[in-house]
Amino acid sequence: MAQIIDGKLIAKNLQKNIRKQVEQYVAQGLRKPGLSVILVGNDPASQIYVRNKGRACEKAGFKSTIYRLAADIAKEDLLDLIFELNQDSAVDGILCQLPLPKHLPKQEVIEAIDPAKDVDGFHPVNSGRLFSGIESLLPCTAAGIIRMLKSIDYQFTGKKALVIGRSNIVGKPTAILLLNENCTVTIAHSKTQNLAELSRQADLLITSAGKENFITPEFTNPEQIIIDVSINRNATGKVVGDVDFAAVEPLVRAITPVPGGVGPMTIAVLLENTLVAYRNHLEKK
Ligand code: GUN
């Protein structure tokens, strides 16, 4: 039986701590941290994520504003909104939910956000700082994974980590953070050969393949820790990760559930990033 890493609980504690800090700032007469979330179009998963982010903000005592924009919004109008939010002194964090409709240039939108307000950590200034090992706003899911592992006292140094997935949102930043923690890191992707064999050798497996039942017993070893990042919907509409959980859970040392694993950590780190941006913002004035 594996240890089940309870992301929901770890995130809850983190959020409580954030809320306390916000209460202290407000008690000193300071304004609340402000997060602006932009949602373009009607992607059902994005709608749920954005709603959850808004709720978490309210609970933490932040001021959150959600901008729901039509799927056919012109690029210029979206960029105008971002520039307005960049200038707004009550806004500490700006997040534009991805994916965007096809006609909108994702990279241009990401780069329009003031790096100091980029609570997603996606702006090249922030990813460049991460790459260089300089303090920065970190991509929330990647930072959440590290937080989770630290909260179970995971000893990273010298461990073999396999990261499946090379996205800018999850795979690449997670790999860099693991490297910073002294892991020996392999990044695998759809063209990787002999993936199961590679995975069997890994002490730590981080998977964001986005494929139900992708991780089967042949990917595991008894000392392995598995972090399942994916959120897939199976044929019956149930939310599942990449791991064939029933088959794999008895065979490894520790594993995250889906839901209730990485997802809540992503939101907790978003709040933390917003609080960091808020503090930096106050100090600058
Ligand atoms: N889409 C999926 N994950 C994320 C995320 O962490 N941030 C944003 N902005 N969009 C996403």
Image: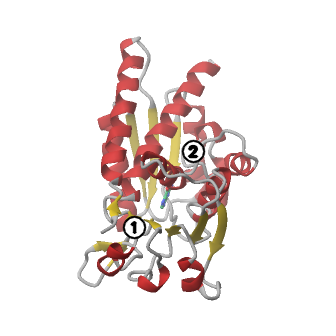
Q: Which of 233 and 14 is in front in this view?
A: 14
Residue at the disc numbered 1: 43
In percent of width and height, residue 245 lies at 33, 75
Residue at the disc numbered 2: 82
Q: Does any atom of ligand 1 lie closer than 8 Å to the CB of label 1?
A: no
Q: In which quarter of the image is residue 26?
A: top left
Is any part of residue 120 visible from this angle?
A: yes
The residue sitting at 23% across, 82% down in the picture is 236
In percent of width and height, residue 284 lies at 64, 21
1 or 2: tag closer to the N-terminus = 1
Q: Nearer the viewer, residue 111 or 159?
A: 159
The residue sitting at 44% across, 83% down in the picture is 214
Type of amino acid under label 2 = Ile
Q: Is residue 54 above or below residue 282?
A: below
Residue placed furthest toward the top: 28
Specify the quadrant that holds the N terminus.
Answer: bottom left
Type of amino acid under label 1 = Asp
Q: In which quarter of the image is residue 58?
A: top left
Residue placed furthest toward the front: 222
**Of helix, strand and loop, which one carries label 1?**
loop
In percent of width and height, residue 234 lies at 31, 80
Residue 261 falls left or right of residue 131: left
The residue sitting at 60% across, 48% down in the picture is 121
Q: Nearer the viewer, residue 119 or 151?
A: 151
Residue 139 falls left or right of residue 28: right
Residue placed furthest toward the left: 236
Circle 2 packing at 10 Å, graded few (<14), some (14-19), many (20+), is many
Is any part of residue 54 visible from this angle?
A: no
Q: Which colour scheme is used?
A: secondary structure
The residue sitting at 41% across, 51% down in the picture is 265
Residue mark closest to the camera, 1 vs 2: 1
Specify the quadrant that holds the C terminus.
Answer: top right
